[in-house]
Amino acid sequence: DTGVSQNPRHKITKRGQNVTFRCDPISEHNRLYWYRQTLGQGPEFLTYFQNEAQLEKSRLLSDRFSAERPKGSFSTLEIQRTEQGDSAMYLCASSNKIDRGRYEKLFFGSGTQLSVL
Amino acid sequence: LAKTTQPISMDSYEGQEVNITCSHNNIATNDYITWYQQFPSQGPRFIIQGYKTKVTNEVASLFIPADRKSSTLSLPRVSLSDTAVYYCLVGDDVNRDDKIIFGKGTRLHILP
């Protein structure tokens, strides 16, 4: 079990640039979540996938944000035309939804820290 | 997903037992209670999960009264390394389509 891997760990970009983050979940996990976290706040839900299907996207999420999970494996989160308010830690988590009758457990990566200058 | 309420912050000393209580008055019949721990610059980590009465593992204990409207995470003999944010979540895994939502959590600060 290699855990959830996120790349890069840190990203500094200029306002208006596009950025893309990658998440590699635990291999047998079929659910993948993206969260955003700012200082002093809990993780804020962005979107999640069951296999390759994107099941929900936060209504608070701008159209500049898009996520994919081709073939139900790794996932990418892209932010277009970044703004200073996008500066945050972007967290990825995966879970195994096969377990029935129990609340799913999320396994998180270490996150990608984005700084928009 | 049932809304939860927990203290914003708590302080304790090394070697003490720490109890963090979470209120979830609207918990549903199928809902489980789950706690996560988060250290700075890391993602949250699952600690413990329970449905009723008491659950214990190598990290913590979870006490859930009969009405299940609250739960208490108990950390025995804390050390400085237990300084972290602790999140309480409730939700069910039966016919569920919605996402897992985190609140602000409880910031636990352990003093020497």
Image (spheres, helix red, strand yellow):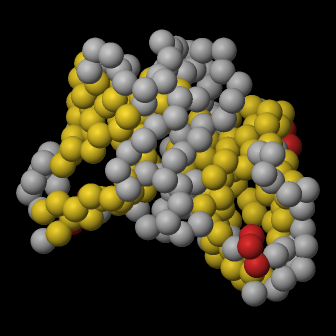
In the rendered structure, the answer to whether residue B59 lies left or right of residue A68 reads: left
Q: Position of residue A7 (x, y in %)?
A: 68, 65
Q: Position of residue A53 (x, y in %)?
A: 83, 33
Q: Is residue B29 visible?
A: yes
Q: Is residue A52 visible?
A: no
Tell me the quarter of the image containing the C terminus of chain A: bottom right
Q: Position of residue A38 (x, y in %)?
A: 59, 66
Residue placed at 60% from the left, 61% from the top? A37
Seen in the picture, residue B29 relative to A96 is either above or below; the reply is above
Residue placed at 12% from the left, 62% from the top? B14
| Quadrant hosting residue A79 | bottom right
Q: Position of residue B3 (x, y in %)?
A: 52, 35
Seen in the picture, residue B34 relative to A43 is either above or below; the reply is above
Seen in the picture, residue A80 relative to B33 is either above or below; the reply is below
Residue extending farthest left: B15
In the rendered structure, the answer to whether residue B11 lies left or right of residue A78 reads: left
In the rendered structure, the answer to whether residue B48 lies left or right of residue A31 reads: left
Seen in the picture, residue B63 relative to A4 is either above or below; the reply is above
Residue in front for this viewpoint, B56 or A27: B56
